[in-house]
Image (spheres, rainbow, N blue to C red):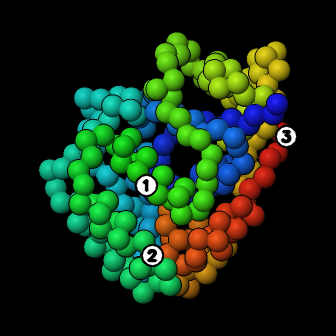
Amino acid sequence: MKKIVTIHQPETFPWLGFFNKMMLCDEYILLDDVQFRKNYFQNRNQFLTKQGPIYLTVPVDFKNYKLIKDIKIKYNEKWQQKHLNTIKQNYSKSPYFNQHINFFELFYAKKYELLIDFNIEIINYIREVLGINVPIKRLSEMGTFNTSSSDLLLEICKSSNATVYLSGRDGKNYLDETIFKDENIDVVYHSFEHPIYNQFNSNEFVPYISTFDLLFNYDREEAKNIIINGGRFCES
């Protein structure tokens, strides 16, 4: 029986391609047991303002903790209220703002100790809105893997009984496909052409920002179709 598995680091306020990739697989593995990457999308993403896109960043302690699963959120400044104010000020007049603002108000009223829990809360909310039922697992809850790079990805696929590994586009640059073939696991690559949609607060379309920008502008069925139509498999 065919089983498509994909593996991706957990992001904060993920972009459309993150969820398109999820829609194309049978199981989604969150790669949380690897090195945290500073100033990347693991603790920030962009939202639109009248002046253009800006990053909403979650301050974290990455000096004392190295793995994504262990990264702790810092609360020595009032960043939660700043995030919420930015979202309200720039999206309050968007068509579907009222469908999501309750989530943000409740979400920012909480204090998450770990960044991974913060990110998963966001991911699960967007999954629910879009009706994505693909199972999600955290690598850190799957046991111990004493490998890295292509070997780690292969071991995860074998542990999940994958017959197909759906790699990110950049996997073409580093993935050793031969070790997957030796285990009868096919490798395909994710190709996502970013859709252009109406952004009420921008005269010029801005791509590669948080999926919430799409959700504020379209209802859930329209948003889901826009995301679905952007992606496909690519053999090489």
Q: Is residue 157 left or right of residue 64?
A: right
Residue 99, numbered circle: 2
Label 1: state its secondary structure.
Answer: helix
Note whether residue 126 is visible: yes
Q: Tell me the CA gap for discs 1 and 2.
A: 15 Å
Q: Nearer the viewer, residue 142 or 169?
A: 142
Q: Nearer the viewer, residue 41 or 26?
A: 26
- Residue at 40%, 66% (x, y): give it: 54
**Total count of labels:** 3
- Mark 1 lies on residue: 122
- Residue at 65%, 66% (x, y): give it: 224
Quarter of the figure with residue 165: top right
Q: Tell me the CA gap for discs 2 and 3.
A: 39 Å
- Residue at 63%, 21% (x, y): give it: 159
Q: Position of residue 151 (x, y in %)?
A: 64, 18
Q: Is residue 81 above or below residue 28?
A: below
Amino acid type assigned to the residue bearing label 3 in the image: Glu
Q: Position of residue 28 (x, y in %)?
A: 61, 39
Q: Is residue 1 left or right of residue 103?
A: right
Note whether residue 83 is visible: no
Q: Is residue 170 left or right of residue 11?
A: right
- Mark 3 lies on residue: 235
Amino acid type assigned to the residue bearing label 2 in the image: Gln
Q: Tell me the CA gap for discs 1 and 3.
A: 31 Å
Quarter of the figure with residue 19: bottom right
Q: Nearer the viewer, mark 1 or mark 2?
A: 2
Q: Position of residue 96 (x, y in %)?
A: 49, 80
Residue 60, numbered circle: none
